[in-house]
Each structure stands twice: as structure tokens, then as C-alpha cells.
Image: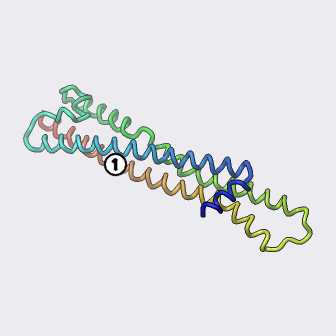
Amino acid sequence: MIDSTLNYLSNGSAITLLVLLTLSFYFIFIFWVFIYRFLSLKSSIFNEEKSLDSLTSRSTTLSPLSALNKCCNGIHQKELLHACEINIIKDASVGISWLSIVASTAPFIGLFGTVVGILESFAKFSGQSKVGFSIIAPAISEALVATAAGIFVAIFAYTFHQILVRKVYELNTYLKAQSQILIAKG
């Protein structure tokens, strides 16, 4: 496995290697964004859940750890609470759109690498009079590695995007519930 990978990298064209390098950067980037955002959202959701539990147990104040409390400074006006909700959600969703961008562009980057690899293969075979399937097949399969890499990266990016969007929605639900309770309690 390692030998075939090293062989592929040593025989690959500059464009194919650039495509694989770009997709490798994408892969590292999406994992970094996911881990950072997931841990941040998990912490925020935990704090807001505890604050909501506090409010529903007849307390009239928000938890000091609540982002809503930090934003509105004890003033419970409907407009201010709504503005704070929007600001908290905006901050919580920073970077998530990059996952969507990677999910939509990675397959095209891989496809570009495949097309260039196939074109280079055909250019190599143009000088030969007889080319059989046994000669063409390995060259085409090597070119298809770029598309497979692009799809592989896109699957992770799309999955991470969906997980984080769900976490932001969960955070938003806790914030809205707290705001409604504070407005109702006056």
C-alpha cells in the first residue's frame, strides 16, 4: 500500500500533485474547523441548557455563564434579547460556511486533476501505434485517484457542515426559549 502510494506520487504530474496537495489542505482545514466549532458549540449549548433549566425552575435571572446574560447585561427587553440572540448565533456559526464551500468545490478540484491526468495519459500514448487496454487502464485508474480524493474530502466536509448546523440550531432553540421566558416574566 505504501509502495504503491509512493510510486503514484513519484510518477504523478505536477498538476495531479498540486490537486492532491490542495485536497490534503482542504482535509486538514475541515477537520480543524469541525473540531474547533464543535467543542465551542458543545460548551455554549451546555451553558445555555443549564441557564434554561435555572429559568424554568422559577429563577428570575439567567445563569452568569449564559451568553445571553453577558450580552444583555440584565436588561430583559424584547428587542435587546432578540438582537443578542442574533449576535450569539452569528458568532457561533463563524466558519461553518467554509465547510459548505469545501463540500461543493472539492469534487470539482478532484475532477480537474482527473481530466488533466487523462489528457496527459493520452498525450503519452499518441506516439504509439498500438495501445491496448492493458496499457490505458492503469493510466486512467491513476488519474481517477484525484476524483476519489475530491469526493472523499467532500463527504467529510458535508457531514461536518450538517452536524454543526444542527448544533447551531440547538443553541438557537435554547436562546429563544430563555428569551421567551424572560419576556413572559417581565
Residue 135, located in which quarter of the rendered image?
A: bottom right
Residue 178 lies, in percent from the top left, at 20, 40
Element assignment for label 1: helix
Q: 24 left or right of 61?
A: right
Q: 24 left or right of 40?
A: right
Who's the residue at 61% across and 46% down the image?
A: 22
Q: Residues within 10 Å of mark 1 (few under 14, many from 20)?
A: many
In this picture the colour scheme is: rainbow
Who's the residue at 44% across and 50% down the image?
A: 161
Q: Residue furthest front?
A: 3
Which amino acid does the dot numbered 1 rest on? Lys
Residue 49 lies, in percent from the top left, at 21, 45
User: Is 53 drawn above or below residue 154 in the view shown?
Assistant: above
Who's the residue at 39% across and 48% down the image?
A: 165
Residue 110 lies, in percent from the top left, at 64, 54
Along the viewing direction, whichever of 117 and 177 lies nearer the viewer: 117
Along the viewing direction, whichever of 182 and 169 lies nearer the viewer: 169
Residue 140, located in which quarter of the rendered image?
A: bottom right
Who's the residue at 12% across and 44% down the image?
A: 56
Residue 7 lies, in percent from the top left, at 69, 59
* Quadrant (top left/top right/bottom left/bottom right) for the N terminus: bottom right
Q: 79 left or right of 155?
A: left
* Quadrant (top left/top right/bottom left/bottom right) for the C terminus: top left
Along the viewing direction, whichever of 103 and 59 lies nearer the viewer: 103
Q: Which residue is mark 1?
A: 167
